Amino acid sequence: MAHLRRLSTVAALTLLATGAVAQPAAAATGDGSPTDANIAYVGRWNTSNAAAYVPAWAGAYLTTGFTGTTVKLKQRNSIDLFYSIDGGQDQYLTNRTGTVDLTPTKLASGRHTLRVSYRVVAGSYHGDAVFQGLILDSGASTYALPRPAKLLEFIGDSITVGTTTSKNALTAYGWLIGERLGARHTQIAQGGACLVTTADGCVGLEDYFLKLSSASTSPAWDFSRYTADAVVINLGTNDLAHGTHTTTFQPHYLHLLEEVRAKYPYAKVFALQTLCKRFGAQTQAAVQTRNAAGDANVYYVPTEGWLTTADYTDGTHPTDAGHRKLADRLAPIIAAKL
């Protein structure tokens, strides 16, 4: 299909990099508290408590600039997290609580950057992913970083979460694509998730896409907080095991596409054929229905031949290398439409 032609990685980067960074509005000197305007929160965060912001779904993260030679996190209870300073490799800390020193070796005095992402809190893993602020040197402050203009949202299950990869969400294809294309990125995904919510407890993204988190008591998400420029949907791997069959999958998928379009009127929407090839025909038919209704910005993406058996850890979840292959295939397709 012509619209799925592959571009080189260089071309993909160029398409998004040109004019892709928006300079932030001037902000007051930042104190590192959760409400500090110089801290950018990407993804869905519960900000109802000004003293403690809580990320939801996989791959939510925060970024900021800071001055001085040290930076520490204020955590409540035990949690695993990843952090990167000055664009360096993400470091992994486990079971940290209280004041968490991210600079045991002091930095050179000056301006630095920080990114923090908490380990996925879902399924069999539980932790206290609660950001209570930063501790900086005396006289130091935060400063706002340039904000990428584009935002990519990935909706899916454990594959989109990055289950079985070395750094979970950070080594999943969605995170990799966002970083590669210089865009903000979100992963509205949970291990074991389905398209359709079922009586036996499968979290159906048809419903939970509209919510702050996957908790049954979750409030509706405030979609005015960000707008996605592209949405990638990778659902259908788990539905058959929870009683959803071909006769019911297509109308539910169509409904999700309608919900995404209602919330993001101008987004490019990419409906992936699942890697296991389940419900591919129904996914494609739902896309064609949207196209026939006049929505030309919804695309079906076949994934046949993208991965081999060697690219999986367990036959279902891709390895780190498998996710990089997915990113190699999908990033140019997304960039071509943006």
Image (spheres, grey):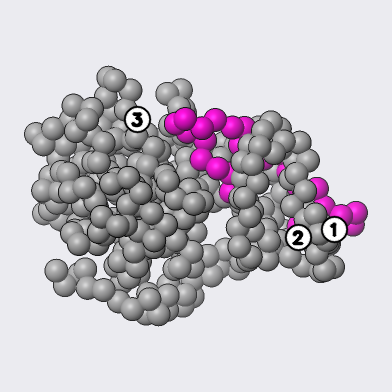
Circle 1 crowding by C-alpha within 10 Å: few under 14, some 14–19, many from 20: many
Q: Which residue lies most toward the right here?
A: 138
Element type where label 1 sits in the image: loop
Mark 1 residue type = Ala
Kindly identify the residue that appears in the image at 47 percent across and 43 percent down. 58
Q: Which one is nearer the viewer's eye here, 19 or 199?
A: 199
**SS assignment for the magenta stretch, majority:** loop
Element type where label 3 sits in the image: loop
Name the quadrant of the C terminus: bottom left
Instruction: State yes or no: residue 61 in magenta.
Output: no
Kindly identify the residue that appears in the image at 30 percent across and 76 percent down. 7
The answer to whether marks 2 and 1 mark residues whose Cβ atoms lie closer than 8 Å is yes
Circle 2 crowding by C-alpha within 10 Å: few under 14, some 14–19, many from 20: many
Q: Position of residue 164 (x, y in %)?
A: 42, 46
Q: CA distance from mark 2 to mark 3?
A: 39 Å
Kindly identify the residue that appears in the image at 51 percent across and 32 percent down. 125
Q: Can the viewer see residue 121 in this picture?
A: yes
Q: Which residues are magenta?
A: 117-142
The answer to whether marks 1 and 3 mark residues whose Cβ atoms lie closer than 8 Å is no
Q: Which residue does the numbered mark 2 point to in the structure image?
A: 66
Instruction: State yes or no: residue 124 in magenta.
Output: yes
Q: CA distance from mark 1 to mark 3?
A: 44 Å
Residue 203: assigned label: 3
Q: Can the viewer see residue 173 in this picture?
A: no
Q: Which residue does the numbered mark 1 point to in the structure image?
A: 140
Number of numbered tags placed on the structure image = 3
Q: Quadrant of residue 258?
A: top left
2 or 3: tag closer to the N-terminus: 2
Q: Is residue 31 above or below residue 13?
A: above
